[in-house]
Image (tube, helix red, strand yellow):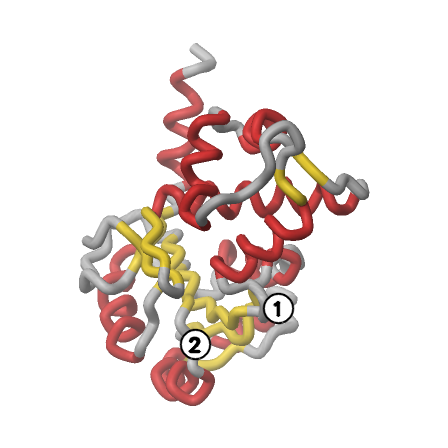
Amino acid sequence: MDTSEKIGKIDIPKKAIYRLSIYYRCLQKLKANEVETVSSTTLAKAAGVKSAQLRKDLAYFGQFGTRGLGYPVDILLSTIRDTLGREHLQPVILVGAGNLGSALLRYHGFEKEGFEVVAAFDANPDAARSRGVLLAVYPDSDLESFIGENSVKLAILCVPVEFAQAVVNRLVAAGIQGILNFSPIVLEVTPDVTVNNVDLALELEHLSYFIR
């Protein structure tokens, strides 16, 4: 898989893209507290990275900030927002509205981060609606037509593991380019598709090591 994401005319490594998202959240908090400038040391500490790493990440934008004064919060926010494509809400679909999927659909924090879950799909839409999901839930047979008609590029996957690869094949063929995968399986996708895996059991196993 390609090791970098092309955003506009800038080639930025995927790990740096992840860190930029963290910087963006930190800058939002600074702006909310009416902070106008921030030093690389302060921003790096808030983001949990080293100052040298932060300066290296921001160097993708060229010369930025003023020595001794720091970075202007508003301008840095705007620059990262444009790079991450957050000037408009990005549409996202969710596939698999079971217990976990339904819980995610009831979460109201996506829009604050620039994303809008526009529809959900499930093999049994009525069961999903009975869980209190207010968003439109469609049968999975409508998946391809909805993606094409609404130019959706992002999907959240919460289907049972035995169906995950088959669903992903359909998503990719329909034009999905980014997948947040909650199914505990390594998915096979084409090089132009990015998959981020969220394995809750694996994360708990990792945490359990540190409490022995």
Residue 133, label in figure: 1
For this rendering, which residue is in front, 13 or 119?
Answer: 13
The residue that appears at 31% across and 72% down in the rendered structure is 171
Q: Name the front one of labels 1 and 2.
A: 2
Q: Please say if 137 is above or below 196.
A: below
Seen at 39% across and 43% down, the residue is: 16
Snapshot quadrant of residue 168: bottom left
Q: Secondary structure at mark 2?
A: loop
Instruction: Point out the tag, 1 or 2, that comes first from the N-terminus.
Output: 1
Q: Nearer the viewer, residue 140 or 108?
A: 108
**155 relative to 74, above or below:** below
- Mark 1: give few (<14), some (14-19) or many (20+) Cα within 10 Å: some
Instruction: Please state which amino acid type lies under the numbered disc 2.
Output: Val
**Residues under labels 1 and 2: Cα distance?**
21 Å
- The dot on residue 87 is none
- Numbered label attached to residue 152: 2
Q: 111 or 56, which is in the foreground?
A: 56
Residue at figure coordinates x 59%, y 73% from the top left = 129
Answer left or right for 141 relative to 86. left
Residue 42 falls in image quadrant: top right
Q: Is residue 48 above or below residue 25?
A: above
Amino acid at dot 1: Val
Q: Position of residue 204 (x, y in %)?
A: 43, 30
Is 41 left, or right, of 167 in this rendering? right
Q: Is residue 26 above or below residue 89?
A: above
